[in-house]
Amino acid sequence: MLYLCTWYIVHACVMVQNRNINIDLAKALAMVLVVLQHAWTMLDLDNPELGLVCGAYRAIATVGVPLFVFVSGALLLPRPIASLRLFYKKRMLRLLLPFVVLALVVYLMTLCTGGYTWWDGTIKNAIISFVPALLNNQINTFHWFVHMLLALYLLTPFMQYALQRLSQREVEGGLLVWSVVMLLKQYYPSLAILQYVGSLWTYMGVYIAGYYIIQYRVGERMYLWIATITTLLLYVWDMLTDCATQLGLPLTAIVLGMLLLNVPMKTVSDVSFVRQVIRNTSRYSYTIYLLHIPFIRMLYQVLPNVISMNEQVTAWMPLWIMPIVMVTFYIGCLCYDKIKYLPNQLIGIG
């Protein structure tokens, strides 16, 4: 027993030391942007009359989800190919167990607040309806991200096998094809072949771009400058052109991811407190994602007088709701993390 405890502690310390601080930073920022986006959209502020404020929210906050996908590709695709059974057992359990557990929490909360019009008030109907609602993304629509990520995970072992046998030029060629198709979806959507290209295509390109950057472009100072300038230009372009969602949004996420993976972090990583906060926010990101919408909804329900203010005042609310959500969940996950007898995998702590 003593040997096993010692091995576990040493193994955990090695895992912490081997974490990539840049990837943790990208995940943490992605979670902040997702919370900001939902804090904004849940106030129905996606209104062109708000001008530059609306454009700024749309250009900046909506990058969170594709940035998550980018980071997932950077984490998973370069890894050695595992057997299908081992990969699916590890990844699907890590993705689905907290999803089911926390979706059940959201489901019960929504039932208690009368959020489902189809519920007849009986326990039997609630029990019978849970699994179909989970499978059909009817518990809460923001769970679509988990279903999309599940589809990517199903394809990941095959993508690993292909990517590790392709040259850099061939991967670049594939990303070029993806970019062309994305442009056609935006400017020639009536093209017949595009009816067979779904939303998974968008996220697959971002996913592979994460692999490409971490495999070939990390550590090159020139690309740090390119990513910085391109990110700023894309943000300005998206704000002024109502956020070009077909290619502009995924491309913004990719160059922002390139910037975050190339930015020098030695000084920051030497400050233990800052490193710990970044690492923990990254580890807690999936848990925060699965629970943040009901919490934001609850905050807005207890702030009716503030929300009833004019739109110009209300438009700034997400900027202080977001840190409240992040700090609350950070403290909650940190407390859960300290409880030795509760498995982190149960609620999605990485």
Image (cartoon, grey):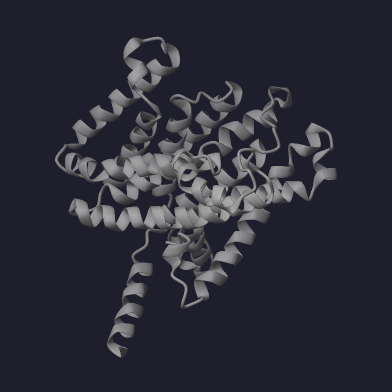
* Percent coordinates x, y for residue 253 in the rendering: 45, 37
Q: Report the front residue among 104 and 197.
A: 104
- Locate residue 39 relative to residue 184 in the image: left or right: right
Point out the image quarter for the N terminus: bottom left
Q: Report the front residue among 188 and 265.
A: 188
Q: Report the front residue among 7 and 86.
A: 86
- Locate residue 30 relative to residue 163 in the image: left or right: right
What residue lies at 20% left-to-right and 51% top-to-bottom?
84
Q: How many marks?
A: 0
Residue situated furthest left in the rendering: 165
* Percent coordinates x, y for residue 183 in the rendering: 39, 19
- Locate residue 75 relative to residue 45 in the image: left or right: left
* Percent coordinates x, y for residue 219 in the rendering: 33, 49
| Residue 20 placement: quadrant | bottom left
Compared with residue 231, is residue 303 higher up or lower down, i.e. above or below?
below
Compared with residue 117, is residue 343 higher up or lower down, i.e. above or below?
below
Residue situated furthest bottom in the rendering: 2
What residue lies at 83% left-to-right and 33% top-to-bottom?
310
* Percent coordinates x, y for residue 159 in the rendering: 23, 40
| Residue 116 placement: quadrant | top right
